[in-house]
Amino acid sequence: MKQTIPYNGSNVMKINAYSMIYKRKSVRKFDKALSLTEDELTAIKEKLKTLVPYNGNIKTAFRIVPSSATTCNRDEYCLLAYSEAKDDYLLNTGYML
């Protein structure tokens, strides 16, 4: 679904960023043969700590949790992204990922 809003700068970017993030959510089936090792999981968590934000004034946090702890049960783990709801927060989160 495409929304049309008169161009006034950041509104267009917010809608486009949300659409792009929403479209990219996973629809694949998890293959247990491709499970992450503890070392791989640790490496991913460490990499998340080094992500550079688009806007450093927006607080963000990322967590990797077992899918059983979420409403999404297709995969082994889920990446949860948290952000302050400030101007361009969706753009900021998308940029980091």
Image: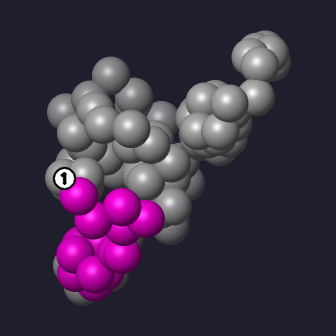
Q: Position of residue 93 (x, y in %)?
A: 41, 52
Vertical relation: 73 (above or below) 52: above
In the rendered image, residue 47, in percent from the top left (x then y), is placed at 31, 80
Q: Is 50 part of what is drawn in magenta? A: yes
x 19%, y 52%: residue: 59
Residue drawn at x 22%, y 39% is 84
Task: Say which element carries label 1.
Answer: loop
Image quadrant where one finds the N terminus: top right
Q: Residue at x 33, y 22 (%)?
A: 71
**Outermost residue, front side:** 8
Q: Does residue 81 appear left or right of residue 4 in this picture?
A: left
Is residue 76 shown above or below 1? below
| Residue 51, quarter of the rendered image | bottom left
Within the magenta stretch, is there residue 23?
no
The image quadrant that residue 73 belongs to is top left
Q: Is residue 16 visible?
A: yes
Residue 76 visible at all:
no
| Towards the viewer: 88 or 6 | 6
Where is mark 1, residue-wise? 59
Q: Please tell me whether residue 46 is drawn above or below residue 93 in the rendered image.
A: below
The amino acid on which the numbered mark 1 sits, given as a three-letter code, is Lys
In the figure, is residue 8 to the left or right of 69?
right
79 sits left or right of 31 in the view: left
Which residue: 60% across, 30% down? 11
Query: Residue 43 placed where, x, y %?
Result: 28, 84
Q: Residues within 10 Å of mark 1 (few under 14, many from 20)?
A: some
Q: Which portion, as a residue range, is magenta?
A: 43-57
